[in-house]
């Protein structure tokens, strides 16, 4: 959620949500699916739209499907630091991000790993 300015200078908020695509889209089902089959399985998108219409004042929403994402390759490695502690004996997990050709972009300590 972030603040925006609507037409005529009216203040508002923009809410962005992400959800899974319809199950029928994932399986590649044809439009010939029966009404009974379609109604038995309510999509995540339909559920989300219902929640947003019920709990906000909006009258309409923009839906963007098949949004592409670019990501670096990731791998984890354990690194030994020059000092030692009682719990991990000075070892720290790091995440190494790189391009497909192997060029390293970043190395960051991982808290959860």
Image: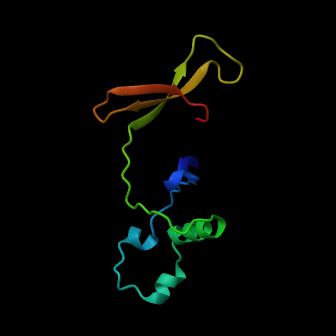
- Residue at 40% across, 67% down: 26
Regarding residue 10, the answer to whether it shows in the image is: yes
Identify the residue at the far front of this view: 8
x then y, percent, for residue 53: 59, 69
Is 31 left, or right, of 79 in this rendering?
Answer: left
Is the residue 81 above or below the residue 37 in the image? above
Is 13 left, or right, of 74 in this rendering?
Answer: right
- What sort of colour scheme is used for the picture? rainbow
Q: Along the line of sight, which residue is nearer the eye, 99 or 84?
A: 99
Q: Along the line of sight, which residue is nearer the eye, 8 or 23?
A: 8
Quarter of the figure that contains the C terminus: top right
x then y, percent, for residue 111: 61, 31
- Residue at 63% across, 64% down: 56
Q: Along the line of sight, which residue is nearer the eye, 51 or 88?
A: 51
- Residue at 58% across, 49% down: 1
Is 77 left, or right, of 88 in this rendering?
Answer: left
x then y, percent, for residue 112: 61, 35
Is the residue 35 above or below the residue 72 in the image? below
Is the residue 58 above or below the residue 29 in the image? above
């Amino acid at each position: 959620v972030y603040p925006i300015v609507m037409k005529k200078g009216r203040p508002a908020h923009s809410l962005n949500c992400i959800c899974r695509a319809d199950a029928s889209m994932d399986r590649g089902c044809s439009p010939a699916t029966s009404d009974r089959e379609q109604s038995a399985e309510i999509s995540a998108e339909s559920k989300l739209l219902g929640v947003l219409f019920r709990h906000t004042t909006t009258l309409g929403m923009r839906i963007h499907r098949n949004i592409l994402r670019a990501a670096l390759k990731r791998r984890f490695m354990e690194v030994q630091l020059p000092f030692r502690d009682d719990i991990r004996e000075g070892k720290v997990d790091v995440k190494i991000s790189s391009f497909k050709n192997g060029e390293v972009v970043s190395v960051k300590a991982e808290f959860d790993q």
